Image: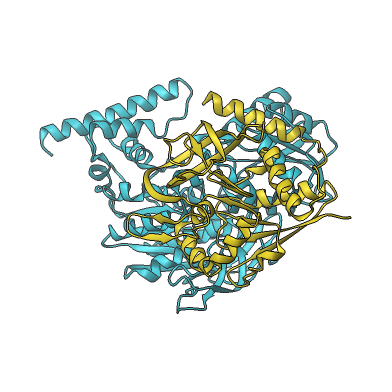
């Protein structure tokens, strides 16, 4: 049977600060190159698509504070549906602002933005912004994760498992040595932009989780020629470690 | 000036001159350091010198095209017989501004200038305006740029709003086609002068658009047409914010090897590629108008204007034209690629991306550029280089565009394109890659001979 996945890009018209297209294209191409159909649909401010039952991967990116507030008020209407989606093992990739939105709240100096309360985490505004290249080590994936972070928020993840241990860089708060959250099929992180193209194993872990949920007989993804991706990953590790 | 102040000013100018001299001896380019040292000695040096400018100070802001606009404006003012102070090399933070003034001053702290034409980095406007009060402020566009330095575009808007508030008597010269610029005119009671391109010129695409939402009320903006990015003819559906009618307006635009257009009915022609350059030209025209300066000879000025380093700069190597262009952000790169596509010759393309501090450490923006458009029938080879060579290579791979070479050496990259049977080579680079690339081009020119 031909496998296929539907990827829902949440508010690409508003949460588009950090070249999220790179992550969407990476997931799409790595499915297509393996003969798996990939359908990318968008939920925009004008045309809201929130039939989460019909999708296999939800991607929530980052935006400016102003845009994030607009998204937040739009998303709060679907809070319960999103929560059910996650609890039922739906795959959700959340980056930067999207990551913060999954928590209970984001406390800015002059206001408190209510979150979706999907993860038992919260974020507080801090100074300075935490900016720079970063390397993580995730427990499930052998390949270190390389990326770039830029966030004013400090995210406190309580008893949640982080996405990875910080090898170099700041992470959730700059102090705890933890970055992101890994929960069920949720991948939440401050590493933004073209994260997945340089981290093919992370991308495949995300895709595998979504395929396993949809197709109980699914076993494993076929191998791809990742020499360019792996070179990119190793090259950035070298560059970042030398900083 | 009391003796103590006189001494400080004297030492500051002397130190700036010495620093510039030493940098020159070592063959370096030093456009910030002399100012930095001068300000250490005399923190209010910019105020002491800029207050002596006789006729007026203009400040040029805007994400893209600042240096081109400012240098052309300087030429226009000089052409009208004025003495002008200008930070020509594009050092546009507080230290760079201080350098321009300090190196133009005599040791006694006097300057002899009719105008100062100063480009200022948007994030530095507040720090600069504390000491220098321009009578004309040009804001030509606001695009997403080097995110890790400036946070977000909203932060830039806030900074500029505060900076404008520091100026009591100023005329804002704003790009009418950019809602992010015209919001400053809408929100203020200061004098405004708008410039814009008042007709649909380019094919309409649906690439990433900034600011689809009204900067005033947050409602959705409706566009009659787009030029590129968020520039175009817009109108908010939620409030009365819309494109103001520009007093300085370009029409009859024809794009080819040259660009032809009219400003308020007067025909202009530039031997210069790139639609975006029209904005630089009409911004200058508008700034001159704001000062009440005659613009009768403006078309002659444009004819003789030579682009500075890395702006579609052409060097012939082994009989083949090699064209270098700088682009720093998605809007700039998309415009550069569109310009390459207007060239029908068979071509090799080299793309170099660095992530040094002055480039912005974050390269996420690579995904906001429509790089895949570069793949056309006239593309021969595609080479990726620069510090982030793999990021740009993957950018192409995940758009199904084959990359021929990934090379850490710009020299090897250029040399191999000189072996192909193409008619032209384009090298698109971001900021810090520009100077090293130019050096390589000049080195190869020496090796092979040939004219610049």
Which x, y percent locates residue A123?
42, 50
Of B327 and B116, the residue lying toward us: B327
Which x, y percent locates residue A188? Answer: 56, 48
Question: In the image, what residue occupies the spot 77% across and 31% down?
Answer: B318
The chain drawn in yellow is A
Which quarter of the picture shows residue B250?
bottom right
Residue B414 lies in what quarter of the image? top right
Rendered residue at 83%/46% (across/down)? A34
User: Taking A202 as reference, is A131 left or right?
Assistant: left
Q: Is residue B193 above or below residue B89?
A: below
Residue found 49% across the figure and 73% down from its top: B219
User: What is the letter of the cyan chain?
Assistant: B
Instruction: Tell me if A69 is positioned left or right of B13 in this view.
Output: right
The quadrant in which the N terminus of chain B is found is: top left
Where's residue B117, x and y in %?
39, 49
In the rendered image of this protein, does residue A147 appear above or below residue B282? above
In depth, the one of A10 and B156 nearer the eye is: A10
- For the point 11% across and 33% down, the residue is B3
Asked which colour scheme the image uses, the reply is: by chain
């Amino acid at each position: 049977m031909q496998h296929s996945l539907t990827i829902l890009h949440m508010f690409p018209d508003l949460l588009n600060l950090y070249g999220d297209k790179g992550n969407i294209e990476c997931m799409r191409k790595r499915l297509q190159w393996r003969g798996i159909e990939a359908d990318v649909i968008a939920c925009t401010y004008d045309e809201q698509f929130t039939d989460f039952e019909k999708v296999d991967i939800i991607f929530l990116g980052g935006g400016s504070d102003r845009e994030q507030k607009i998204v937040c008020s739009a998303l709060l209407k679907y809070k319960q549906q999103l929560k059910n989606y996650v609890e039922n093992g739906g795959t959700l990739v959340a980056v930067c602002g999207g990551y913060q939105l999954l928590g209970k709240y984001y406390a800015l100096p002059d206001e408190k933005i209510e979150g979706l309360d999907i993860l038992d985490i919260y974020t507080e505004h801090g100074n300075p912004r935490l900016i720079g290249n970063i390397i993580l080590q995730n427990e499930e994936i052998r390949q270190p994760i390389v990326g770039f972070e830029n966030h004013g928020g400090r995210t406190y993840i309580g008893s949640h498992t982080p996405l990875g241990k910080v090898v170099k860089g700041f992470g959730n708060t700059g102090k705890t040595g933890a970055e992101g959250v890994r929960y069920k099929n949720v991948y939440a992180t401050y590493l933004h932009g073209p994260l997945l193209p340089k981290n093919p194993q992370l991308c495949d872990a995300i895709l595998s989780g979504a395929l396993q949920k949809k197709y109980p007989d699914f076993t494993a993804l076929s191998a791809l020629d990742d020499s360019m991706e792996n070179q990119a990953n190793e090259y950035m590790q070298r560059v970042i470690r030398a900083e | 000036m009391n003796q103590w102040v006189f001494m400080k000013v004297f030492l500051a100018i002397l130190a700036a001159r010495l620093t510039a001299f030493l940098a020159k001896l070592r063959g370096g380019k030093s456009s910030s350091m002399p100012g930095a040292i001068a300000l250490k000695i005399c923190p209010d040096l910019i105020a002491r010198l800029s207050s002596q400018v006789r006729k007026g100070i203009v400040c040029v802001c805007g994400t893209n095209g600042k240096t081109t606009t400012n240098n052309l404006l300087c030429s226009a003012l000089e052409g009208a017989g004025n003495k002008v102070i200008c930070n020509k090399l594009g050092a546009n933070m507080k230290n760079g501004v201080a350098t321009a003034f300090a190196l133009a001053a005599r040791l006694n702290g006097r300057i002899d200038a009719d105008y100062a034409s100063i480009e200022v980095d948007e994030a530095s406007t507040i720090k600069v305006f504390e000491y220098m009060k321009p009578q004309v402020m040009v804001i030509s566009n606001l695009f997403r740029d080097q995110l890790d330095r400036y946070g977000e575009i909203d932060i830039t808007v806030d900074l500029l709003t505060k900076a404008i508030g520091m100026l009591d008597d100023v005329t804002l010269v704003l790009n009418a086609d950019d809602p992010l610029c015209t919001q400053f005119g809408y929100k203020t009671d200061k004098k405004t002068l708008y410039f814009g391109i008042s007709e649909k010129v380019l094919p309409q695409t649906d690439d990433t658009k900034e600011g689809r939402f009204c900067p005033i009320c947050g409602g959705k903006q409706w566009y009659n047409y787009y030029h590129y990015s968020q520039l175009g003819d817009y109108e908010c559906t939620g409030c009365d914010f819309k494109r103001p009618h520009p007093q300085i307006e370009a029409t009859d635009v024809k794009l080819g090897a040259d660009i032809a257009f009219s400003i308020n009915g007067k025909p202009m022609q530039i031997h210069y590629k790139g639609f975006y350059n029209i904005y630089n030209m009409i911004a200058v025209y508008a700034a001159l108008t704001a000062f009440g300066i005659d613009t009768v000879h403006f078309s002659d000025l444009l004819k003789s204007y030579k682009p500075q380093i890395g702006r579609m700069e052409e060097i012939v190597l082994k009989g083949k034209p090699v064209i270098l262009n700088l682009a720093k952000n998605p809007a700039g790169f998309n415009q550069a690629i569109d310009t390459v596509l207007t060239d029908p010759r068979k071509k090799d393309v080299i793309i170099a991306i660095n992530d040094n501090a002055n480039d912005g450490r974050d390269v996420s923006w690579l995904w906001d550029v429509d790089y895949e458009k570069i793949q056309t029938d006239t593309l021969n080879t595609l080479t990726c280089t620069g510090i982030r060579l793999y990021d740009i290579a993957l950018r192409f791979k995940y758009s199904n565009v084959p990359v021929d070479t990934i090379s850490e050496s710009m020299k090897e990259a250029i040399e191999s394109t000189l072996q192909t049977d193409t008619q032209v080579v384009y090298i698109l680079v971001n900021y810090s890659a520009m100077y090293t690339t130019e050096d390589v081009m000049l080195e190869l020119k020496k090796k092979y001979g040939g004219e610049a």
